[in-house]
């Protein structure tokens, strides 16, 4: 019915990541390639290796990260690879679900796997943008799944509500 995959591909984000990576790896380059020894105490080789591995590992993690969301007659399935495995919320566990506008920075402190302060907003999985699928569970836990297909998600949720598969779809 509804399927969406989002990845971190924003140019501004990758510009920041590359700037940080260059800042971290420049001393390693200076030390290993040119043989320069900045400062009185040069960096040990093992520190250089750890710095290279963690920097490249972080870049690989960001590049491979993706959020998948599916909505069907049974519920909402979501994952945030490689950190959050596939999870499914059945409609019987959902009190309310709707598409809404949100501010990732003000409400959740940014994008990614986020938790709001206190229980007020709950948890969020978001990659970019300002629209999300707000889910309120019968246990009163809240989850926001960011979406770039807000209109399509809203249409699917309305159809499921008309079929009485979803009980409460706020508009």
Image (spheres, grey):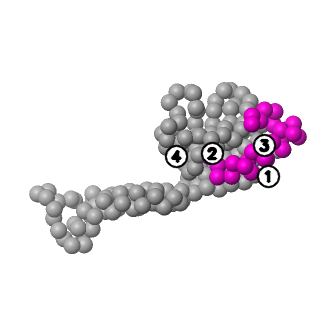
Mark 3, secondary structure of its residue:
helix
Question: Of tags 1 and 3, which is closer to the observer?
Answer: 3
Q: Nearer the viewer, residue 18 or 73?
A: 18
Q: Secondary structure at mark 4?
A: loop
Above/below status of 49 relative to 94: below
Which residue corresponds to mark 4? 111
Compared across the picture, whether 29 is left or right of 88 comes to left
CB of mark 2 within 8 Å of CB of mark 4?
no
Q: Which segment did they paint magenta?
A: 146-171
Please tell me which residue is depicted at 53% across the width and 36% down the height of the picture.
Answer: 107
Quadrant occupied by the C terminus: top right
**Residue tagged by mark 3?**
157
Give the CA distance from mark 4 to mark 1: 26 Å
Mark earlier in primary sequence (1, 3): 1
Q: Which residue is mark 1?
A: 1
Q: Dot 4 surroundings within 10 Å: few (below 14), some, or many (20 or more)?
A: some
Residue picked out by circle 2? 131
Left or right position of 99 against 122: right
């Amino acid at each position: 019915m509804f399927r969406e995959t989002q990845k971190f591909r924003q140019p501004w984000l990758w510009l920041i990541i590359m700037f940080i990576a260059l800042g971290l790896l420049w001393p390693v380059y200076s030390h290993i390639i040119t043989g320069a020894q900045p400062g009185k105490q040069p960096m040990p080789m093992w520190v250089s290796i750890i710095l290279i591995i963690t920097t490249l590992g972080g870049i690989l993690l960001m590049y491979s990260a993706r959020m998948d969301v599916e909505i069907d007659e049974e519920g909402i399935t979501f994952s945030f690879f490689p950190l959050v495995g596939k999870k499914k919320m059945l409609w019987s566990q959902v009190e309310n679900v709707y598409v809404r506008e949100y501010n990732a920075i003000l409400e959740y402190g940014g994008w990614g796997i986020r938790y709001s302060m206190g229980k007020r907003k709950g948890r969020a999985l978001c990659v970019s943008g300002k629209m999300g699928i707000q889910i309120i569970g019968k246990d009163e836990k809240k989850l926001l799944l960011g979406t770039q297909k807000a209109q399509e998600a809203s249409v699917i949720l309305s159809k499921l509500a008309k079929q009485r598969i979803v009980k409460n779809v706020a508009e």
